[in-house]
Image: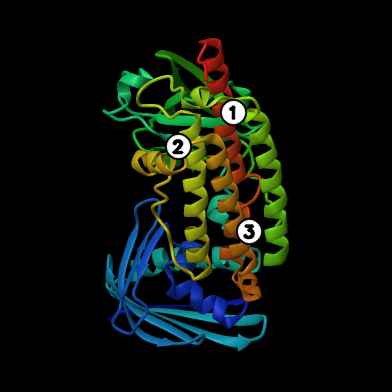
């Protein structure tokens, strides 16, 4: 004897938005998956991996555009899921039937998991907010990477692991306890930060307003403090792609003006200065922002089509240095950056108006182009450029 349960949810969303949420990698990562790989055809694969390590492997058995998605679950527990969609316009109803469960005890676990996921689906469909992300408290750090055997000596971290800080968010906990660029956090809430997922495990049990003990290294010296966790701000999203493009244009104009001020009077030799052989100079940092802009364009196209883009590659030294090989001077690099930014704006302007009905994807595109997205990343690098040029001048680097 096998067991079956049925769940029904109504959404202020189109049937096509619900269908996309179950049949595209990007749609699935908006609300249930940390990573997804699908081949959307009858007999095609379905793979969902959640951030906490839970995995589902399946095979599509029936697909009817905007009406039906059915798949066999091949693991971890063999069963079958059928999702029926009804409605038109801006309202739709989803009925999910999970059948073929061999043990009654499986019903409770799967029912709770689906109920939580479908509630989050409602949030992403109706507001664009993935509650897995927006309910999670913030440390207020940008991450540059992790410590491993290759860079352990540079960061002077005896443990050989840790998360490298690449700046802090103004007003949040990391700034308040004094974390700065190139600090390495090795422990949080008594959890060793051996990888990014350890950071997630340390934060996930907490809520905004809590404080967690952290330990970090700066220039080989270990520090400890209690870090207060902040709530995650909900950004204002321009309602149309045209308005989003204009907001991005204004933000880029401010960023370009900031960079021009930093570079005013800088010589090519100063921009070539690097504090160590393995570190970037000012030109290479600008090249990195160009590479990031180009990667963002590919990411936007993938997000609009419901696909995922997993490898930005903009930190790759070969890619960064090759950009400087072609654009060798500061004027050439800044001109190329302006062109890349202009193409991003043009790309956003060309997004179809219908993208806004897929609120999760549109929200992700808009937030990444906003002041707390790529702009925050860019400004952190501008601070590094400023410091490099000042150091070069102090050391008498001439043109």
Structural distance between the alpha carbons of marks 3 and 2: 38 Å
Q: Earlier in the sequence, mark 1 or mark 3?
A: 3
Nearest-to-viewer mark from 3 and 2: 3
Q: Are marks 2 and 1 in contact (CB under 8 Å)?
A: no
Nearest-to-viewer mark from 2 and 1: 1
Residue 112 drawn at (x, y percent): 46, 64
Q: Quadrant of residue 127?
A: bottom right
Residue 101 drawn at (x, y percent): 32, 75
Q: Earlier in the sequence, mark 2 or mark 1?
A: 2
Residue 139 visible somewhere in the drawing: no
**Left or right side of 393 for 222:** left
The label number, if any, that marks residue 51 in the structure image: none
**Where does label 3 land, which residue?**
345
Find numbered disc 3 in the image and state the secondary structure of the residue it sits on. helix
**Left or right side of 260 for 281:** left
Structural distance between the alpha carbons of marks 1 and 3: 24 Å
Residue 27 visible somewhere in the drawing: yes
The label number, if any, that marks residue 383 in the structure image: 1
**Crowding near pointer 2: few (<14 within 10 Å), some, many (20+)?**
some
Which quadrant is the N terminus positioned in?
A: bottom left
With respect to residue 209, does 104 lie above or below? below
Q: How is the protein colored in the picture?
A: rainbow
**Residue drawn 31% across the image and 18% down it:** 158
**Where does label 2 land, which residue?**
202
**Residue drawn 60% across the image and 40% down it:** 376
Which residue occupies the foreground of this view, 366 or 199? 366
Structural distance between the alpha carbons of marks 2 and 1: 29 Å
With respect to residue 206, does 227 lie above or below? above
């Amino acid at each position: 004897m096998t067991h079956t349960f049925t769940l029904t949810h109504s959404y202020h969303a189109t049937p096509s938005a619900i269908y996309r949420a179950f049949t595209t990698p990007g749609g699935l990562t908006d609300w249930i998956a940390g990573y997804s790989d699908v081949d959307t055809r009858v007999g095609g694969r379905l793979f969902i991996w959640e951030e906490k390590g839970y995995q589902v492997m399946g095979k599509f058995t029936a697909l009817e555009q905007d009406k039906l998605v059915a798949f066999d679950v091949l693991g971890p527990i063999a069963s079958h899921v059928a999702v029926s969609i009804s409605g038109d316009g801006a309202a739709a109803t989803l009925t999910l039937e999970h059948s073929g469960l061999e043990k009654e005890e499986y019903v409770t676990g799967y029912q709770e998991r689906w109920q939580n996921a479908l509630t989050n689906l409602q949030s992403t469909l109706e507001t664009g907010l993935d509650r897995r992300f927006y309910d999670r408290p913030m440390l207020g750090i940008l991450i540059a990477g992790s410590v491993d055997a290759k860079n352990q000596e540079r960061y002077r971290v005896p443990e050989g692991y840790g998360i490298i800080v690449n700046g802090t968010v103004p007003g949040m906990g990391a700034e308040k306890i004094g974390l700065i660029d190139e600090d390495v956090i090795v422990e949080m809430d008594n959890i060793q930060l051996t990888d990014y997922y350890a950071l997630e495990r340390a934060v996930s049990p907490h809520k905004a307003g809590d404080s967690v003990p952290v330990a970090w290294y700066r220039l080989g010296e270990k520090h400890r403090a209690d870090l207060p966790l902040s709530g995650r701000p909900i950004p204002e999203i321009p309602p149309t792609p045209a308005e989003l493009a204009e907001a991005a244009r204004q933000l880029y104009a401010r960023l370009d003006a900031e960079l021009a001020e930093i570079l005013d009077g800088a010589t090519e030799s100063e921009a070539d200065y690097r504090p160590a052989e393995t570190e970037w100079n000012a030109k290479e940092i600008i090249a990195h922002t160009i590479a990031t802009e180009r990667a963002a364009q590919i990411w936007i196209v993938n997000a609009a089509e419901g696909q995922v883009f997993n490898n930005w590659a903009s930190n790759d030294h070969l890619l960064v240095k090759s950009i400087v090989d072609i654009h060798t001077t500061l004027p050439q690099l800044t001109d190329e950056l302006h062109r890349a930014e202009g193409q991003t704006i043009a790309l956003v302007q060309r997004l179809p108006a219908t993208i806004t009905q897929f609120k999760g994807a549109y929200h992700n595109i808009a937030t990444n182009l906003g002041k707390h997205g790529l702009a925050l990343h860019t400004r952190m690098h501008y601070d590094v450029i400023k410091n490099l040029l000042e150091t070069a001048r102090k050391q008498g680097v001439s043109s």
